[in-house]
Amino acid sequence: MADTARQVLGILGTRAACLVVSVFTSAVIARSLEPEGRGVYYMAVTVATTATMLGHLSGEQSQSALWTDAGRREALAGNSVPLALVLGTLSGLAGTASVAAVGPETLNLPGMYLVMVACLSVPLGIASNYAGNIALLRGRVDVANWSLLAGALAQCAPVAALAAGERLSVAAALMVWVAAGGVPLVVFISVGAAAGRHRDLTLARTTVTTGARYHLGPASVFLLMNADIYLLSALTGAREVGIYSLAVGLAGYSRMLADVVSQVMLNRQFNSSDTEAADVTVRITRYAVLLALASALVLTVAAPVLVSAVYGAAYTDAVPLVMLLAPGVMALGASRLPSTYLLRSRRAPTVVVPSVIALVVNMALNLLLIPVWGAAGCALASSLAYVLLAALQMRLFSRMTGVQARKLLPKAPDLLTLLASARRCIPNRQAAA
């Protein structure tokens, strides 16, 4: 536990730096563009990220499932970037064509040019995801996190410079975002974290077909967390999207601790026997629940001050939305390890069914609540759907492993162990001297 805690705390230093940089960048964009402009910017970004997530065909999940065969690992690494660039190019074109078909005005976008700029990020995003997952499977968590910091800094500096010169427009912000999205890929390539000694076309096809079996699940999870943006934009307007998207971003920060724990444990979940992986998942999930709960409480208390001080009075309506989203985001963070473990079974329904159910519930609730309560209804619907997804994933993990669901929930000794491990990771004065 102490070694895991040291890894987590070490990574948190990098993630904390990313968080500070990201909050600063987000605040500059929010203050420069105002809610309506931020809504247009975020809608274009959402189109591109949707194309990225739908077009990667669950390559990361496929890599993880195939990684258990040691003889395929070098070819999986060698295939990762070229395969991702091909899929990303096709997906970017498909995303652009889809918006053109429905009409950008339907999404409150002023024209196709913003979508075309944003979709340039799709090949880079998929390649970064594939390469980053290979790095994590190899245990190179440090490289994965440093790549995030490099990308955050690459976006922050130009945005700040443009804002200082009063030249930060929606288009300019999008161009910077696209360019910064390619920085993590450069980091992975430069340090060889995702390099492989050879490529295998047959394995590339296997990777795609294996991922396609799982893809409805991750795609549904992504749509679960982003389809509400499309519905809110269509049913309300850009200003509501600008405020709601800020709340979503802030609520997402509360998942940082749980995400870090999941990254640290990925290597152990897929490089151990089924019994050992299940035991690790159960033990660490209890700590993840505690971390997710603490993060949600801190966010809820800090939101009223953070929003007005950092983003300005124009965004004060985001505060209650953050509070509505916090329980759902906490549940997703707490269930991260059990949901990852489900991939070991290589049974697509265990990954797909919970996500599809939660997505359908989310869409139905949004269509019912947005016309009545606007962004607040959107936040409530999404939070309830997140909790449902987490509950379904934990239930499936319990059935698959035979572990009672209550054993995934923390008790007082778990809190004491977590605190003791954190204290042991802090150098004492004598050691520091």
Image (cartoon, helix red, strand yellow):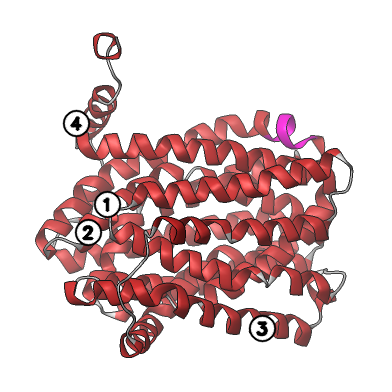
Contact? badges 2 and 1 (CB < 8 Å): yes
Which residue is denoted by mark 1 in the rendering? 265
Given this view, does label 3 or label 2 mark the residue nearer the observer?
A: 3
Q: Which badge, 1 or 3, comes first in the chain's sequence?
A: 3
Q: Residue at x 30, y 73 (%)?
A: 197
Q: Give how far apart the Cα atoms at labels 2 and 4 are.
A: 24 Å
**Magenta-tinted stretch:** 307-312
Could you say whether the residue bearing mark 2 is in a helix, strand or loop?
helix
Q: Give how far apart the Cα atoms at labels 3 and 4 are.
A: 53 Å
Which residue is denoted by mark 3 in the rendering? 93
Residue 31: x percent and y percent? 81, 41
Residue 131 counted in the magenta span: no
In the foreground, 208 or 374: 208
Q: Is residue 281 left or right of residue 254?
A: left
How many callouts does the rendering have?
4
Task: Classify 8 as above or below 247.
Answer: above
Could you say whether the residue bearing mark 3 is in a helix, strand or loop?
helix
**Looking at the image, can residue 260 be seen?**
yes
Given this view, does label 4 or label 1 mark the residue nearer the observer?
A: 1
Q: Which badge, 4 or 1, comes first in the chain's sequence?
A: 1
Kind of residue sitting beneath label 2: Gln
Query: Dominant secondary structure of the magenta stretch?
Result: helix
Q: Which badge, 2 or 4, comes first in the chain's sequence?
A: 2
Which residue is denoted by mark 4 in the rendering? 413
Could you say whether the residue bearing mark 4 is in a helix, strand or loop?
helix
Which residue is denoted by mark 2 in the rendering? 269
